[in-house]
Image: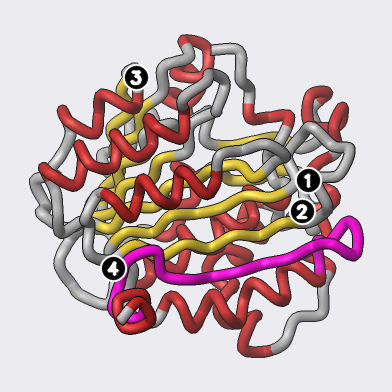
């Protein structure tokens, strides 16, 4: 309950998460049928990067700030266009003052038939998120522990959709909660696409986390990771990862194009790295055989 995303909005971790989120939404929109996005930890939805909090850390300057100024390869630019167009739309006079959180980004990319359910437990952040979407019939904002929504709000009535899980990692055991939450949600909505964010930092139990995900038996689990610096002598965030369940068949190839570009643009030292691989899936099964 102490975590406030305004200090980190637009950083390298947000860039990875939101770039992939936009690709997933565009894939869902290949069919005319409506879908719903369930965003379990919505935050305030829209961030003012000129605020005292954002300026205090300046993390956005080495994230979205660098990406917006980069000379992108045409293929990479095309993949990032839905995400970057939303950022430009919020800043019509140029520069970057306003940055969309995941609920706002979803809403900006929606068609008339698409819907959003956004959860937020922090009382002040819930009020701001609710005000942001007040009167918008495409969005339902609920003051609720996002972990509970994986049971109470699934499956969506549209029977199609995506579940975004981006917890603050304030407490011990969050990696285990991610696995447990995924299993809970998948049991109720096995046809949904799930996108789970997690931090990379020194001492994080990533190997055990991946092994626990493999042990769930969920058939299709794709992993994407981006590190911008070495974790030697650093206790804070050095990278982030995404777990994507039921990913579009095109996503792994798209990641292989996007991740090298994002690494080169946002690298903070020569140890920056990236990888995209199946934890469970056809390629993983073939390799194990």
Report, in whole angstroms, how far the alpha carbon at label 2 lies from the one at label 1.
5 Å
Residue found at x 28% / y 50%: 215
Residue found at x 52% / y 35%: 45
Q: Are marks 2 and 4 in contact (CB under 8 Å)?
A: no
Report, in whole angstroms, how far the alpha carbon at label 1 lies from the one at label 3.
27 Å
In the rendered image, which residue does mark 2 sit on? 63
Residue 282: within the magenta? yes
In the rendered image, which residue does mark 1 sit on? 60
211 above or below 201?
below
The label shown at residue 145 is 3
Report, in whole angstroms, how far the alpha carbon at label 1 lies from the one at label 4.
28 Å
Residue toward you, 157 or 97: 157
Q: Which residues are magenta?
A: 265-283
Q: Residues within 10 Å of mark 3 (few under 14, many from 20)?
A: some
**Left or right, 284 with reference to 53:** left
Q: Secondary structure at mark 1?
A: helix
Q: Are marks 1 and 4 in contact (CB under 8 Å)?
A: no
Q: Earlier in the sequence, mark 2 or mark 3?
A: 2
Residue toward you, 78 or 96: 78
In the rendered image, which residue does mark 4 sit on? 28
Q: Are marks 2 and 1 in contact (CB under 8 Å)?
A: yes
The image shows residue 192 at horizontal and vertical percentages of: 21, 56
């Amino acid at each position: 309950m102490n975590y406030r995303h305004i200090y980190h909005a637009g950083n390298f971790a947000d860039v990875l998460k939101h770039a992939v989120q936009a690709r997933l939404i565009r894939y869902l929109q290949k069919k005319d049928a409506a879908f719903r996005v369930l965003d379990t930890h919505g935050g305030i939805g829209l961030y003012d990067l000129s605020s005292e909090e954002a300026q205090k850390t300046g993390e956005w300057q080495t994230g979205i700030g660098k990406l917006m100024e980069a000379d992108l390869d045409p293929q990479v630019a095309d993949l990032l266009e839905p995400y970057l167009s939303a950022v430009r739309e919020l800043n019509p006079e140029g520069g970057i003052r306003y940055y969309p959180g995941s609920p706002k980004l979803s809403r900006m990319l929606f068609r008339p038939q698409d819907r959003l359910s956004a959860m937020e437990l922090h009382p002040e952040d819930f009020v701001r998120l609710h005000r942001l979407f007040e009167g918008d019939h495409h969005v339902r904002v609920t003051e609720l522990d996002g972990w509970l929504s994986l049971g109470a709000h699934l499956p969506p009535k549209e029977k199609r959709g995506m579940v975004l899980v981006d917890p603050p990692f304030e407490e011990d055991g969050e990696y285990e909660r991610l696995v447990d939450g995924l299993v809970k949600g998948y049991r109720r909505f096995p046809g949904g696409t799930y996108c789970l964010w997690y931090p990379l930092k020194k001492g994080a139990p990533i190997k055990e986390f991946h092994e626990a995900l493999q042990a769930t038996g969920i058939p299709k689990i794709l992993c994407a990771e981006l590190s911008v610096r070495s974790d030697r002598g650093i206790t804070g965030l050095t990278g982030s990862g995404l777990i994507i369940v039921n990913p579009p068949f095109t996503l792994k190839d798209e990641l292989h194009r996007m991740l090298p570009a994002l690494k080169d643009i946002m690298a903070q030292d020569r140890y920056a790295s990236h990888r995209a691989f199946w934890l469970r899936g056809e390629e993983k099964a073939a390799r194990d055989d």
